[in-house]
Amino acid sequence: MSYLKSLPAETTLLQVFRAYPGPAKHLLAFHEEVLRGESPFTPGERELIAAYVSGLNGCDYCHGIHTVTAEAFGVPEGLLSAAVADLASSPVDARLKPVLAYVGKLTRTPARMTEADAEAVFAAGWDERALHDAVLVCALFNFMNRMVEGVGIRADAAYTAESGKRLREVGYAGLAGLLAEA
């Protein structure tokens, strides 16, 4: 139930963005750059990171939508729930596990990050750009999880599926184009 009384009780993030288009257009442009721009990570891997961070934060809205989006990009079904439950025993690709461990620690205990945490990412074959991009996705979704939870946004399974597929098809730039639609 939305805490923004001027919006419907069952408010979606798109409705919040439409109500506050100034910040939304900049936020969506940032999403487009971070999640669809040039990166060592594929869009599916970045959506995986987003969904993982959201799962760790218990943000069902973001976790659900970005899980669907990651799966639409080819991430195997069930992988995210397994990773959130126990990353070490999950079927996540060995090269991605240190990245998820890094963003997991950054999400849970940011002041405890060390050079050794970064070195584990580098040892898995990722470069500094990859570390930077993983940090940006992590930071963005810690922000988004707090925004979504702070305004009381929820979604049912049908909306989650629709939204995740829409993000795969039109990206965040396409979503920004929907701001003007009533």
Image: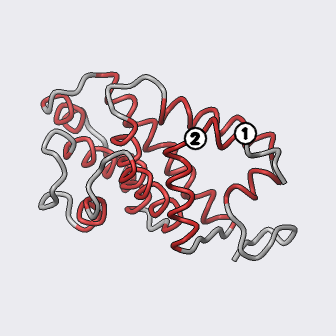
Q: In this view, does 98 lie to the left or right of 23?
A: left
Residue 41 percent coordinates (x, y): 33, 32
Q: Which residue is drawn at 44% across and 51% down?
A: 69
User: Callout 2 environment at 10 Å: few (<14), some (14 to 19), or many (20+)?
Assistant: few
Q: Could you tell me the amino acid type at mark 2?
A: Val
Quadrant where the N terminus is found in the figure: bottom right
Nearest the eye: 76 or 107:
76
Residue position for label 1: 177
Q: Quadrant of the C terminus?
A: bottom right
Going from N to C along the chain, the mark reached first, 2 or 1, is 2
Residue 108 lies, with reference to residue 158, above or below; the image says: above
Question: Which residue is located at x 71 percent, y 74 percent?
Answer: 10
Relative to 36, does residue 104 appear above or below in the rendering? below
Q: Which residue is drawn at 84% across and 72% down?
A: 5
- Circle 2 residue: 170
Under circle 2, the secondary element is helix
Q: Do the residues labelled 2 and 1 touch (CB within 8 Å)?
A: yes
Under mark 1, the amino acid is Gly
